[in-house]
């Protein structure tokens, strides 16, 4: 008989993972879950296999708050190859057009301002967006093209890092839902030569950046040396992505009522918006939302013990 499977651990927290090239976000999550032997996990928005960098992964009760990291702003460093347009907008696609490249720094600096601020993007066919229930990338692989509505995104910073021959490197700070492939294609179009993404690295997601990220090699080395528990110190608290939210401190009584689904009045609470909730010991127990009558209503709560 085979040995019984070990019970998964109820472990809570956020790991800032430095996703390697070639790995899907879901495979990254499953690998990290296995290394931690975690019962539950979720990621905070996918990062393409051809991209690397910051991918916050939520384990256990932290998954209840992953949506708020999904909504957070992101930052990337991307390399664009000028003069070559592909079917997918990145290096994975087939080349559909090639043009000579004769682009100067001055020309690049002249076009970048038009892609800064609030802009509209038409999502690429090779994306996970759905049309009549079907992911666009599946339709694209079948040779179909459907009309896509423009989406509003905000590019808060677009910085030219380098231009060497046909390789253009940019740093992009943007809102969620921004397609870097589309941005690069549009910049290539404005420069008159076309372009595609040849490399992409996410350097920031919400409050998290590369300085906090942990590589797969580090995780595997620690696991080999000390097992699942040797990784636990790498986890950030479950509310680490919400630290800019106002805090409401609860008494034992108000915490009890909140944990049983009731809205409560707490002196000193903000007038509106989302809040972090802490119990009488200062422990994070979940998030709430202020109601019109100045009460705190429970929104998502950690496991209630007691």
Image (cartoon, rainbow, N blue to C red):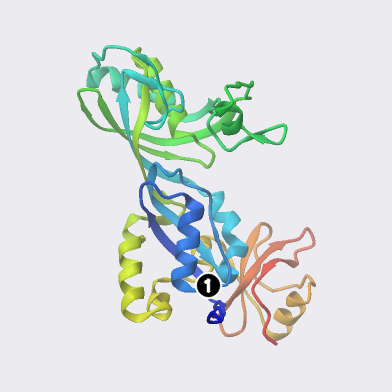
Give the vertical position of 78 relative to 282 (above or below).
Answer: above
Picture quarter with the N terminus: bottom right
Q: For the point 48% across and 46% down, which residue is it?
A: 73
Q: For the point 56% across and 76% down, which residue is it?
A: 8
Picture quarter with the C terminus: bottom right
Question: Where does residue 105 sit, x and y in percent of width and height?
Answer: 23, 22
Asked if residue 117 lies left or right of residue 299, the reply is left
Asked if residue 135 lies left or right of residue 153, the reply is right
Question: Where does residue 203 sit, x and y in percent of width and height?
Answer: 36, 48
Which quadrant holds residue 172? Answer: top left
Q: For the point 50% across and 61% down, which residue is it?
A: 30
Asked if residue 178 lies left or right of residue 109, the reply is right
Q: For the point 43% across and 44% down, which residue is it?
A: 49
275 and 301: which one is in front?
301
183 and 279: which one is in front?
183
Instruction: State the residue position of label 1.
Output: 38
């Amino acid at each position: 008989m085979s040995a019984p499977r070990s019970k998964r651990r109820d472990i809570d927290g956020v790991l800032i993972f430095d996703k390697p090239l070639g790995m899907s976000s879901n495979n990254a999550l499953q690998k990290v879950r296995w290394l931690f032997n975690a019962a539950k996990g979720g990621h905070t928005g996918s990062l393409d296999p051809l991209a690397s960098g910051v991918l916050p992964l939520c384990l256990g009760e932290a998954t209840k708050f992953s949506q708020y990291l999904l909504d957070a702003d992101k930052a990337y460093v991307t390399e664009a190859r000028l003069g070559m347009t592909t079917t997918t907008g990145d290096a994975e696609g087939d080349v559909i057009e090639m043009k000579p490249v004769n682009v100067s720094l001055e020309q690049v600096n002249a076009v970048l301002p038009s892609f800064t601020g609030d802009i509209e993007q038409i999502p690429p066919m090779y994306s996970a967006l759905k049309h009549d229930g079907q992911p666009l990338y599946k339709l694209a692989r079948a040779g179909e093209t459907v009309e896509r509505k423009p989406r509003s995104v905000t590019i808060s910073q677009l910085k030219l890092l380098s231009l060497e021959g046909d390789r253009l490197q940019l740093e992009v700070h943007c809102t969620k839902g921004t397609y870097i492939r589309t941005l690069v294609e549009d910049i290539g179009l404005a420069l008159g030569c076309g372009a595609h993404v040849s490399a992409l690295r996410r350097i920031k997601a919400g409050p998290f950046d590369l300085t906090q990220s942990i590589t797969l090699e580090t995780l595997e080395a620690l696991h080999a040396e000390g097992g699942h528990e040797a990784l636990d110190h790498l986890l950030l608290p479950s509310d680490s992505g919400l630290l800019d939210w106002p805090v409401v401190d609860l008494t034992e009584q108000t915490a009890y009522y909140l944990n049983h689904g009731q809205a409560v009045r707490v002196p000193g609470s903000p007038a509106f918006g989302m809040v972090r909730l802490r119990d009488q010991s200062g422990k994070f127990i979940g998030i709430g939302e202020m109601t019109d009558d100045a009460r705190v209503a429970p929104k998502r709560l950690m496991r209630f013990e007691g």
